[in-house]
Amino acid sequence: MTLKRLYIALLGALLVGCQQQPVAVHTTIEKETFEHSEKDLLHRSNSYDKETIISSFADQHPKEWGESVTGVKTAFHTEEHELALTFDACGGQHGSKIDHQLISFLNDQAIPATLFVNSRWIDENKEAFLELAENPLFQIENHGTEHKPLSVSGETAWGIQGTDSVEEAYEEIMENHTKITELTGRSPELFRSGTAYYDEVAVEVASDLGISVVNFTILGDAGATYSSNQVKNALLDASPGDIALLHMNQPNSGTAKGVMEAVPLLKEKGFSFVKLENQNLR
């Protein structure tokens, strides 16, 4: 079944289910408004319909694999001197800690940031997660369920095997998406996979779910392996509209100190810091 036919069927079902409610009928509908409504309806429906997604992508075979494949957003359009700091919380046996020094600095300096949070990290830090989600400085987004590269064919990145089917890619996105939504009352709109690797079909799966895949233009701490000086230098090389990838789950790394040293110097250069929400991603 094509998506267009699916839409028609879904629209009919929705109208039947609403017959007992008053309906306002407008005789004129702008084409653009209708197309936008169609897209929104499909995204809402697909978000809860795994079988539709699996069927839609069953015959697609990826040709790309990497950090910047077709469909991945790595920066944002801006006319201002703006930079987006993003921090991953990866979870797992060696990744479920909290960099309290980093979070305190961002709070004290009122630096907004986008936090990509993994399901396993949430499970280990639920109280802290809820505090971060309630803090208006921070935007909570999805860093996956098992922290796997997002693939429909089991590709591997940095020794970690990715999801090996459309179904597994869906689950890697949607299980944590649902968890974040239930805990915070807000549905994530952005996704970054474990290792930040994808194939273009998996990226399209996310897009059909109404979710943008976001990577980076600045490798801020190289998986929390950089020294503080390397972190500082990476950030000081920023251009307006850049997205920096850093980590908030490795308190023994050089990330916090590097960010703390870079931020005042970036401000001297005229930079301000923004979350990714409502940005024109590219």
Image (cartoon, rainbow, N blue to C red):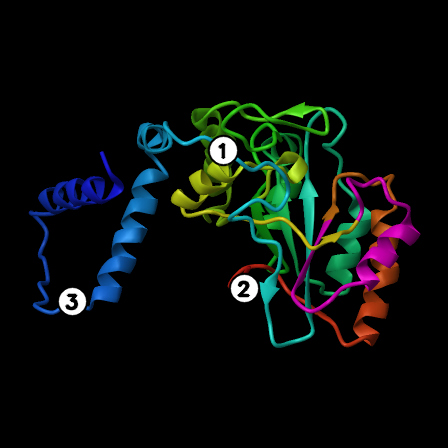
Q: Which residues are magenta?
A: 221-245
Residue at image point 63% right, 39% down: 66
Question: Which residue lies under the disc numbered 2?
Answer: 279
Does the residue at mark 1 contact the one at mark 2 (Cβ under 8 Å)?
Answer: no
Amino acid type shown at disc 3:
Ile
Q: How many marks?
A: 3
Q: Is residue 24 left or right of residue 222?
A: left
What distance separates the C-alpha of mark 2 from that of mark 3?
Answer: 28 Å
Amino acid at circle 1: Pro
Across and down, in percent, residue 97 comes to 76, 35
Marks 1 and 3 in Cβ contact (< 8 Å) = no
Above or below for 21 versus 29:
above
Looking at the image, residue 195 sits to the left or right of residue 265; the answer is left
The percent position of residue 258, horizontal first and vertical second, equals 87, 54
Using a 10 Å C-alpha cutoff, classify the residue at mark 3 as few (fewer than 14 neighbours), some (14 to 19) or many (20 or more): few
The residue that disc 1 covers is 62
Distance between the alpha carbons at the discs numbered 1 and 2: 28 Å
Q: Sequence-wise, which precedes: disc 2 or disc 3?
A: 3
- Give the number of the mark in front: 1 or 2: 1
Q: Residue at x 58, y 52 (%)?
A: 134
Above or below, comparing residue 155 to residue 218 in the picture: above
In this rendering, the answer to whether 249 lies above or below 162 is below
